[in-house]
Amino acid sequence: MISIAIDGPAGAGKSTIAKRLSAEFGFIYVDTGALYRAVGLYALRQGLTQLNAQTVPPLLPQITVKLKFVDGLQRVFLNDQDVSEAIRQNEVSMAASDVSAIPAVREFLFELQRNIAKENNIVMDGRDIGTVVLPNADVKIFLTASPEVRAHRRHLELLEKGQSVDFQQLLEEIKTRDHNDSTRAVAPLKQAEDAVLVDSSDLTLEEAVSAAADTV
Ligand code: DC
């Protein structure tokens, strides 16, 4: 099986590029952030306001997260309910970042990610795919962009979905998430030594897709 790992911070364009590559090569696209989002969503739905190593692990035995692929596109199921749209709400982003710092949550989701890669040709995106989940991936890309460019893209994306969020607030959230994701003790966001860096700050979408496809 062939694996292409794409890591990088929120809003760098990982999912757009991963989708394009997976369509081009006929691979399955696996968005691992969705798994952390599903756990975060569950914790929010249980009414938790503090998401930490004391409050979240006791919930894990109540949770099953499954991925299904329809025409190569991923749907996420939380206890057999399709939450593919619900996990995209903006408040779920921070919850996902919070739960992703908890070692028990990372362990809980690890095998699921590994098993998909064992059985399929995949493009998998996340934060620790090239470093932890698939250290032997055939291709590793680290995709980044400046926080301002990423906040601007996220702003447009949310507006298109009819959610209006203040730009400054988004920028602050992106910076906070970058900080959380890259300073946590377990599997922090960082470029694998053998990953190719693509900085999309000054690239159009097409240019960024070409840079990634050339790397593959
Ligand atoms: O890619 P995303 O924004 O949907 O991810 C949501 C959160 O999940 C992100 O803040 C960090 C976490 N995450 C992670 O820790 N490891 C991954 N492989 C993917 C996401």
Image (spheres, grey):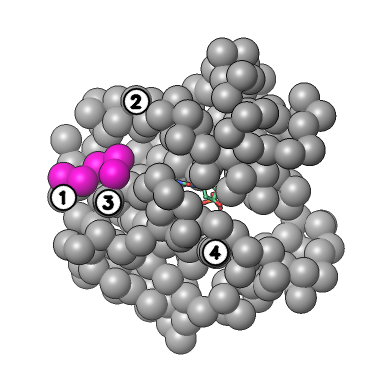
Label 1 Cα neighbours within 10 Å, binned few <14 / some 14-19 / many ≥20 = few
**Residue 85's spot in the image, x, y percent?**
68, 39
Give the residue at mark 4. 179
State if disc 1 and disc 4 touch (CB < 8 Å).
Answer: no
Give the residue at mark 1. 138
Which secondary structure, mark 2?
A: helix
**Residue 113's spot in the image, x, y percent?**
36, 32
Q: Which residue is at the front of the view, 27 or 190?
A: 190
State if disc 4 and disc 2 touch (CB < 8 Å).
Answer: no
Give the residue at mark 3. 130
**Residue 150's spot in the image, x, y percent?**
58, 72
* Cα distance between the residues tagged 4 and 1: 28 Å
Nearer the camera: disc 1 or disc 2 = 2
**Residue 65's spot in the image, x, y percent?**
53, 23
Nearer the camera: disc 1 or disc 3 = 3
Vertical arrangement, residue 182 with respect to residue 145, above or below? above
